[in-house]
Amino acid sequence: MLQDKRILLILTGGIAAYKGLDLIRRLRERGATVTPVLTRAAEQFVTPLSVSALAGHKVYRDLFDLTDEAEMGHIQLSRSADLIVVAPATADIMAKMAQGRADDLASTLLLATDTPVMIAPAMNVRMWDHPATQRNLTQLRADGVTVVGPNDGDMACGEYGPGRMSEPLEIVAEVEVHFGPRPLTGKHVLVTSGPTHEPIDPVRYIANRSSGAQGTALARALLDLGAQVTFVTGPADVPPPAGAQVVPVETALQMRDAVGAALPADAAVFAAAVADWRVASASDRKLKKTRDGMPALTFAENPDILAHVAQMTEGRPPLVVGFAAETNDVIANATAKRARKQCDWIVANDVSPDTGIMGGSENAVTLISEQDAESWPRMSKDDVARQLAQRIADALT
Ligand code: CTP
């Protein structure tokens, strides 16, 4: 329930602004007070009168409205809320937020605030997929902004794909999670993530295709549930989550040492794709082409960090979770892997190239424990992360 929660709702200009009207109703039904802000463009889609009537509150529209400034300055307005929700959030407001621009009331409020911000993007699929928007999205996430949706579907412009704003009830559900219980408060969770890079010489290395997306999403979901998170990450494609204690590493040996230094923990989740081998003969000088033929690389096995932590006799985290990236016999291989490494759970996923999972935004996992194997439907890596974080919370509390 959202009793007495103060929400500053910024509507920006998109056809989805009409859903913003329903969002106001849904938030108020649950006891929240909603202070609405409309951009100029939003006024092309919904009227200030309908917004203020539904909100039961004055609508703020203009940065230079002296009456508004006399009643409540924009700085105070931006800080007098428990949460700022931008719904719909256009590509334009996302760009402004990512760059820290402040050229109208909405963008100024967003820059002037220290209140948590949640956005529900809504735009044409090409605009959503554009590298500029994706760049802005990555930046906003790194800045600690919660992103809800967008969903796939038919769009007002006649195209199909991601870009449709989440439904008002989906946004309300996220708002409720934001204000909900934080069962992992006081718990320390260690997460490893990303690939490792194993040097061949100072300019070359052996790597793998892990983007770090699943581990990052998991760390974010654990933070949302109140955990203190130590995030030991190899060189990933995605930025680490805001709010975690980030320990960047490059090699498996560095990751092992960072994990050792981060213990004790109440739970440890090993989402990193650690290289099984490193180059034993790594050179401290760049290898040169010679007439004598190609260099022969010899390998040494890397320590298995997960197995080591799972088998600690003293100071073992009460819950140790591994991931199993498999391309065939996924459940059988992962079940055997869990028993071999002696972790409590293993999250098995099929990383065959045709699944598009490695480096993609979705995952289809099976959660394997000593007792059973539970297959989850294919869903976004964010949703896998949220469900797994909730399971971890259930196990620890
Ligand atoms: N892992 C680890 N340290 C390693 C290798 C793997 O901590 N040196 C962890 C990974 O983070 C993951 C789990 O072990 O949680 C499984 O990794 P995976 O590479 O799928 O399994 P392997 O142990 O390499 O087994 P195989 O090569 O037989 O697939």
Image (tube, rainbow, N blue to C red):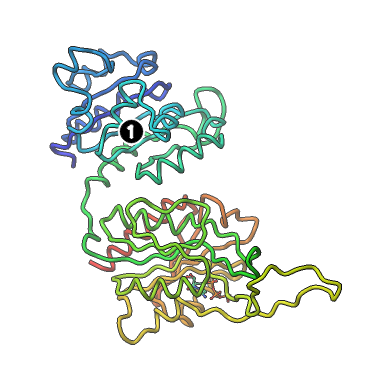
Name the image quarter holding residue 192: bottom left
Q: Position of residue 9 (x, y in %)?
A: 27, 28
Drawn side of residue 345 relative to residue 189, left or right: right
Q: Position of residue 61 (x, y in %)?
A: 28, 17
Drawn side of residue 111 relative to residue 137, left or right: left
Drawn side of residue 181 relative to residue 237, left or right: left
Q: Residue at x 36, y 53 (%)?
A: 220
Q: Residue at x 35, y 43 (%)?
A: 146
- Residue extending farthest right: 291
Number of numbered markers: 1
- Residue extending farthest bottom: 313
Q: Position of residue 187 (x, y in %)?
A: 25, 65
Instruction: Give the residue at mark 1.
Output: 168
Q: Position of residue 241 (x, y in %)?
A: 39, 52
Name the image quarter holding residue 263: bottom left
The residue carrying pointer 1 sits among few (fewer than 14), some (14 to 19) or many (20 or more) residues within 10 Å by Cα, namely: many
- Is the CB of mark 1 within 8 Å of ligand 1? no
Q: Residue at x 20, y 27 (%)?
A: 77
In this view of the protein, which residue sits in the foreground, 242 or 387?
A: 242
Q: Quadrant of the C terminus?
A: bottom left
Q: Is residue 394 above or below residue 44?
A: below
Q: Quadrant of the N terminus?
A: top left
Q: Is residue 372 above or below residue 357?
A: below
In this view of the protein, which residue sits in the foreground, 356 or 297?
A: 297
Name the image quarter holding residue 85: top left
- Residue extending farthest front: 285
Q: Amino acid at mark 1?
A: Pro
- Label 1 SS: helix
In this view of the protein, which residue sits in the foreground, 58 or 111?
A: 111
